Amino acid sequence: MSYDPEAADTTAEEPLTLPTDRRTGCPFDPPTELTALSDKPLRRMRYVDGHIGWLVTGHAAARAILADPRFSSRYEVMHTPVPMEGMSGELPPAPVGDITGLDAPEHTRYRRLLTGKFTVRRMRQFAAHVEQFTTDCLDAMERSGPTVDLMEAFAQPVPALVICELLGVPYTDRERFQNQVTTIIDQTAAAEAKDEAYRALLQYLNELVLAKRAEPTDDLLSDLTTSDLTDEELAGIGGLLLAAGLDTTANMLGLGTFALLSNPDQLKALCTDPSLAEQTVEELLRYLSVADPLPRSALEDVEVEGQLIRAGEMVTVSVQAANRDSHKFPDPDRLDIHRKITGHVAFGHGAHQCLGQQLARIEMAVAFLALFARFPTLRLAVPPQEVPLRDRSNIYGVISLPVTWDK
């Protein structure tokens, strides 16, 4: 499509701010103001510092932007779409090892080293560990039940144990490691406690890297010690994998369980036919889209969907809206585990697509099947409207999920 400045110009519209209010309607749906924009894939948007950029809600536009190297992921060229605690003015460059805030060629160097560690085959070999950790957590739930907070008892510890295994955290350190991580992602924890836990975790990761160099074991960090990565880079990558793989998966397990319990016909279909597990995971990823939004900055003038985005302008890709785009997904507001879904952007798209997506898929498929097989009468222990939602973070989910079952 050629660019027609008169037809495509929307600068006269009043710029909107990123809709974030989920307080009305279904807890699994994006803000209604966001999905109402689906017929216009790009809209002018005002950022926190007054910058006028773009909000992207269309699926095709989202994939085009995320796959285009002319849009930068570097933090220092970003304008924040929503207020960030303790952050004002310009953003600092990405910390060492944080590949999500880098462009090529720096990003390419890291990505090439890591891609081979997360192949589908290798992650499937890891499935036995996932199954064991899931069983251990379910055993503990059964002993302490029949009423528990599913986030505390299951959704958080399963991915934490998986990350421990992936990074090679010794068994003797795993309780301390999990406690630090839990504090960091706890929305109710004091800022001082979070900062202290974060510093302690970084210190631990630095010590772990030195230990792996001295005595390598069968884990990802040990594998990477044979590369040209520095100790600081290795520790930074460990922190990134922890942040990317734990919080998102934990909230998918918690919010996904809530969604299945709220759609008993879908839950019954899964329990009746466990072969639907992989489809269920893909549909939950699309339907819930817990990691949102994805910001980018135009490095040069780029035309997307007939609209000119000028160099220096920010674009914010709404994953929630893109995954509810009716032009791509018919009846998008309905959870349907029979849906043959392809092309959702829950893991992003393009060069920065989530490295650990195959491991996350395995974790969720194993965990959901095992949870409902062990507790077929699992149900909410509070009315649905009393489940506290985690809506002040770029990772959506539930703060806690009280559940119960029949003994």
Image (cartoon, rainbow, N blue to C red):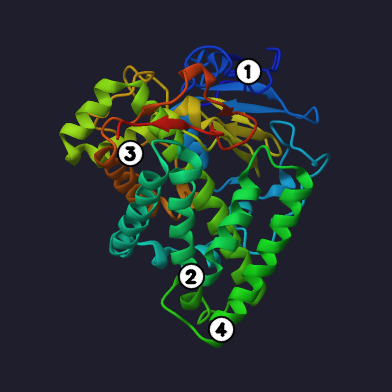
What is the distance, in whole Å, between disc 2 and disc 3 at their CAs? 29 Å
First in residue order: circle 3 vs circle 1:
1
Observer-side mark, 2 or 3, equals: 2
Q: How many marks?
A: 4
Q: Which mark is residue 281?
A: 3
Q: Residue at x 82, y 39 (%)?
A: 88
Q: From where the camera sits, is residue 187 visible? A: yes
Q: Is residue 286 above or below residue 21?
A: below
Write down the residue under mark 4: 213
Q: Which mark is residue 149?
A: none
First in residue order: circle 1 vs circle 2:
1
Write down the residue under mark 1: 9
Q: Residues within 10 Å of mark 2 (few under 14, many from 20)?
A: few
The kind of residue tagged 4 is Arg
Q: Is residue 317 above or below residue 387?
A: below
First in residue order: circle 2 vs circle 3:
2
Judging depth in this view, the residue of 318 and 225 nearest the camera is 225
Q: Position of residue 382 (x, y in %)?
A: 47, 22
Write down the residue under mark 2: 171
Q: Secondary structure at mark 3?
A: helix
The kind of residue tagged 3 is Val
Do residues under tags 3 and 1 come within 8 Å of each other at their CB atoms?
A: no
Q: Quadrant of residue 372?
A: top left
Q: Residues within 10 Å of mark 4 (few under 14, many from 20)?
A: some
Observer-side mark, 1 or 2, equals: 2
Observer-side mark, 3 or 1, equals: 3
